Amino acid sequence: MNDMKRPVSIHLRSRQQEASNSELFRGIIEAFGDELELTSSPDEEDSIMEIRTQGTLSCTDDGRIELSYDETELTGMEGSTTTVSFSRENPDVVTMLRWGSVTTTLVFEQGQRHICVYETPIMPFEICIYARSVGNTVTMDGGSITLDYLIEIHGAKAERTLFSLTVTPTDQ
């Protein structure tokens, strides 16, 4: 099969909130992952971001589906390009690759912990990703990816993120 690319409309929605106990990242998250709850104080609210953008959906010869789009000022990563990809044979392991003003590779695999490095203009830092759930229905005809994950910035506070990405081809 030849690489096939198609223009798409992308709707991203992300909700972050401080996790109730970052100690869970230090070895016992597998045992208590389902009990980790979102917490907030009266002064604190969820951070919700919603973006609609355009991108490209492609299927490569090696069986990967890739969705690429440019980041915006709203995400704080203007000047970066993000590619979300997965193998058609294993759609529940999603990789998010960013390069440009911010560079990183994030891996989301349900029930697994992945250590990643975030390169920023100021300095690189290590983060830990623990995916509580990964849902993926994306094909070359569109679909959605949903991620529920915890992110810890090298010993600092942990956040829980609920992320959804909906893809709709624009060439229909």
Image (cartoon, rainbow, N blue to C red):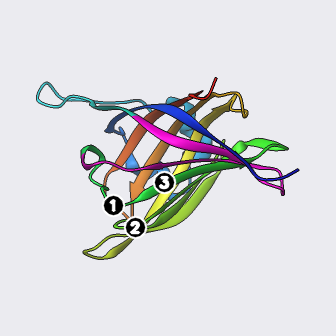
**Can you name the residue that lies furthest to the bottom here?**
123
Tell me if residue 20 comes above or below residue 123 in the rendering: above
Where residue 14 appears, x then y in whole percent? Answer: 39, 34
Q: Of helix, strand and loop, which one carries label 2?
A: loop
Q: CA distance from mark 1 to mark 2?
A: 6 Å
The total of numbered circles placed on residues is 3
Q: Earlier in the sequence, mark 3 or mark 2?
A: 3
**Can you name the residue that lies furthest to the right here?**
1
Where residue 101 appears, x then y in whole percent? Answer: 34, 67
Residue located at (72% from left, 34% from top): 140
Where residue 22 appears, x then y in whole percent? Answer: 39, 49
Tell whether 18 sits left or right of 110. Answer: left
Q: Quadrant of residue 18?
A: top left
Q: CA distance from mark 1 to mark 3?
A: 10 Å
Residue bearing mark 1: 79
For disc 2, the neighbor class at 10 Å (few under 14, some 14 to 19, many from 20) is: some
What's the residue type where badge 1 is placed? Answer: Gly
In terms of depth relative to the viewer, which is nearer, 97 or 135? Answer: 97
Mark carried by residue 100: 2
Q: Earlier in the sequence, mark 1 or mark 2?
A: 1
What's the residue type where badge 3 is placed? Answer: Thr
**Can you name the residue that lies furthest to the front here?**
171
Q: Of helix, strand and loop, which one carries label 3?
A: strand
Where residue 126 appears, x then y in whole percent? Answer: 43, 69
Tell whether 57 sits left or right of 122. Answer: right
Q: Which residues are magenta?
A: 53-73
For disc 1, the neighbor class at 10 Å (few under 14, some 14 to 19, many from 20) is: few
